[in-house]
Image (cartoon, rainbow, N blue to C red):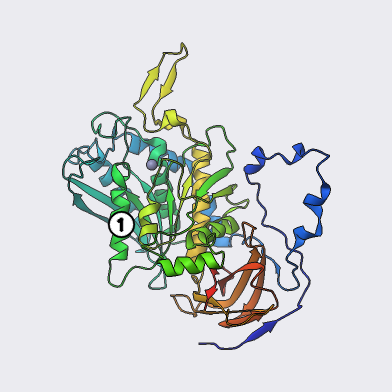
Amino acid sequence: MWSIVLIVAQATLAVAIPLTSRNPASILYDRASIPAAAPASVFACSASNWPPNTIGKANEPQQPSEDLTAILAAVDPKRIQATIEKLVSFGTRHTLSTQTSKTRGIGAARDWIHAEYQRYADASDGRLSVKTIGYVQKPDGNRVTFATRISDVVATLKGTDENRLYVISGHYDTRNTNVLDYEGDAPGADDDASGVAVSLELARVMSNPAYPLPKASIAFAAVAGEEQGLYGSQFLAQTYANSTPRVNVEGMLNNDIVGSPNGADPHVIRLFAQGLPPLTVENSTKRESRLQIGGENDTPARNLARFVKEVAENSATGMNVSVIYRLDRFLRSGDHRPFLEAGYPAIRFTEPRENFAHQHQNVRVDNSTGTPVQYGDLPQFCDFGFIARVARVNGATLWSLANSPGAPTNVRIDTEALGNESTLYWDPPVGGEGNVDAYEVVWRATAAPAWTDVIDVGLVNRVTLDLSKDNVVFGVRARSKEGHRGVAVLSFPG
Ligand SMILES: [Zn+2]
């Protein structure tokens, strides 16, 4: 353990520049429409540069490495299209549909996904391994009316470090207007063959022996039972959580309904990130402390979402990420939730604007208005170039996470005494300090959405900064020898 104390004060004068982002909120809040009569001081007074920055520098986005740039360029919209069309060809993939037919139903889809992952594994020089895991769900008096096997297909790319895993998932089951209709066609192209195609395509590209192995492992999952009650993701999250030792899932990305911008900006993807974790994950004492320090916006899920913006908004992905501070859309739920409930940071990607005639609807043409309207979740409504860009956002995130040193643990801030300096201290990441080149302290004004400032403090576990903890939110992150940063962690009172 390093115990060097570093005092950093009055270093270089830096101007804080927010991360570049064309947030779609600007569509609703058109800056050009602000009346000229509006008092200029509201927008330009010196308070907008407060708190003052006398140390550190602007926190800039992390540009993709050479390997990552090649990986993102290899993501192929045609492969994504072929995956979605193949999944749709099984007619229905309803969780209660047949599991014995080779051509129709969820069993045939499960076996095809397994075989497809196996093809990538066979070409991976032993890097990728595939498993179909599952259990029998008893009738639940709700959406499962008879005992049904729930199967998750998981391909895992084994990293060079033990004990660290990132998970990406889409659900391969589908539904109709009637959630219990397991016989009618339910193509599920957008919901959620699109998300499954993202998992498959990234598994194919990232397991290519042309690229170095990542530090952490990555699990590419396709789960069932989502529409019947998140059963497949629940099983997967609990399988990791109940393993001995508990699997250290450092981040989970759920892709559900990522098939089309539906007329909205095609270069934006929404990212849902939960605030306060459930009390089963963070007890009332910790929650009390979180509320006391104004840490409700700095949960592991929110800081994972901030990380996505830093590494995945660039010309290699062609996308902007619109973070939404919410578990999910109204009236909806998704496979990231069981992971959050198991205590893992988890977030959800969903297209920027949904077309509700094209999801959870029987395939039919409605002529009642005189103009024929096609209902149903059909591949013709998917934008494969858009899905490829979403896959690149996920790829940039996963590869950056898996090559980072992970996150420091037990990040604390000294609150023993009043003062205008701040002392932070922490323990190494779960994977150890072998791959840590330096730690970085990041901060932002309490009302700012993303980390605006950063200072490299070296390979230490304690630092005192000439910046008041009362005025900013502090986080600490680790940076690898190759320059990959990890997710920042909020400091709690020690
Ligand atoms: Zn879905």
In the rendered view, does 52 fall on the left or right side of 342?
right
- The residue identified by callout 1 is 236
Q: Count all numbered tags in the image, as a single digit.
A: 1
User: Which residue occupies the foreground of this view, 80 or 327?
Assistant: 327
Q: Is residue 488 visible?
A: no
Q: Quadrant of residue 7?
A: bottom right
**Quadrant of the picture in which ligand 1 is shown:** top left
Q: Quadrant of residue 356?
A: top left
User: Which residue occupies the foreground of this view, 162 or 228?
Assistant: 228
Q: Residue at x 76, y 61 (%)?
A: 49
Q: Quadrant of residue 18?
A: bottom right
Q: Look at label 1 and name its amino acid.
A: Leu
In the rendered view, does 33 fall on the left or right side of 210?
right
Regarding mark 1 in the picture, which secondary structure is present there?
Answer: helix
Residue 280 image position (x, y, % from top left): 36, 62
Q: Is residue 3 visible?
A: yes
In the rendered view, does 148 fall on the left or right side of 75?
left
Residue 312 image position (x, y, % from top left): 57, 54
User: Which residue occupies the foreground of this view, 179 or 421?
Assistant: 421
Q: Residue at x 69, y 74 (%)?
A: 467
